[in-house]
Image (spheres, rainbow, N blue to C red):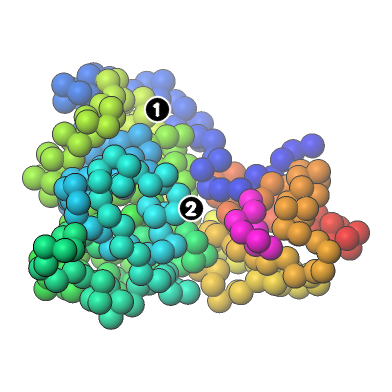
Amino acid sequence: MKTIDLRSDTVTLPSPQMRQAIYEAELGDDVFGEDPTVQRLERKLADLVGKEAALLVASGTMGNLVCVLTHCGRGDEVILGDQSHTFYYEAGGISALGGIHPRTVPNQRDGTLRLEDIRAAIRPDNAHFPRTRLICLENTQNRCGGAVLSAEYTQAVAALAREHGLALHLDGARIFNAAVALGVDAKALTQAVESVSICLSKGLAAPVGSVICGSKRFIGEARRTRKILGGGMRQAGIIAAAGIVALDTMIDRIRDDHDNAARLARGIAGLSGLEVDLTAVQTNIVYFDVVREGLSAETLVSLLAERGVKMLCSGPGRIRAVTHYGIERNHIDETLAALAGVMAAS
């Protein structure tokens, strides 16, 4: 039985073209700055998001951690959403390793942070308080259903940051999902920020790696931070080669993931005992709630797995499904049939 894995877009397998590129990659020692394939990837992605320079890191979590540690010192404070990936899913790394204090403000349903909430969270100059140094946004916003932040909103937050002498970091793990959903160039969503981290192994379907982008000065400091974290990799061109293919071949294809997610959400909306907010499905992430008495999200996930469909519990009564490379329209129809079968039998 073929498994339809909708737990995350991190479960993608590299395309045949990526595997060939890995095999043929020209390699050197990246710690010495001598891996030509890594250099090609970094230049390519920096150009795509309108930044001067870029740096390959092992993961999205490492990318965010490197950026926050580079922007902030021990005892400094970062303002970020209470549903943000950095606050919720990164093991408290900014505090554990950087001594950096997180100041959370509520994420709105559309993934944004209200400007007035950000402004109210900025500390005055007082010896009793940590110094506010950084604001972090996330686009798309995972826990808000893959919500998309507009260029205009990001620019408004950037203006507020500049007004107070703060930096703005963007967790852009799925930034190309946002760009495709909005029909804009990725540069429009990143031009106002000082740093952005972009994941190669989600919608872009590369097997590993993320890239952070910013000014030459920032990336120079970030390279030192990456070294402190043990993130210097040697012949990293075998990672970068797949990333280059991902950027060349996967961005336009992301539209298929969004269409499949919308199809899945519409089907779920028609099943008794399940609820989904169709307006919240903007990209490739679908959250839905189990509202049938006596049926838990954990049980439903387990019953689906027995039918060859994997999803992820994301809270009491809530399930997440994520579409990605390797999931086709027929898989969505098979998933809906499995869901219908489970709900009819429950």
The answer, for residue 212, to whether it is visible in the render is: no
Q: Quadrant of the C terminus?
A: bottom right
Relative to 332, residue 118 above or below:
below
Report which residue position mark 2 lands on: 253
Residue beneath the point at 47% across and 59% down: 142
**Residue 219 magenta-drawn?**
no
Residue beneath the point at 65% across and 65% down: 288
Q: x%, y% of residue 130?
A: 19, 59
Q: Which residues are magenta?
A: 312-319
Q: x%, y% of residue 54?
A: 21, 42
Q: x%, y% of residue 261?
A: 60, 61
Crowding near pointer 2: few (<14 within 10 Å), some, many (20+)?
Answer: some
Q: Amino acid at mark 2?
A: Arg
Relative to 100, residue 344 above or below:
below
Q: Does residue 286 appear to the left or right of 195 in the view shown?
A: right
Residue beneath the point at 54% across and 72% down: 280
- Are dots 1 and 2 in contact, CB under 8 Å? no
Nearest the eye: 333 or 248: 333
**Displayed quadrant of residue 11:** top right
Mark 1 or mark 2, which has the lower sequence index? Answer: 1
Residue ranking furthest to the right: 345
Residue ranking furthest to the front: 128
Q: Does residue 54 appear to the left or right of 243 in the view shown?
A: left
**Displayed quadrant of residue 34:** top left
**Residue 317 magenta-drawn?**
yes
Nearest the eye: 158 or 209: 158
Report which residue position mark 1 lands on: 21
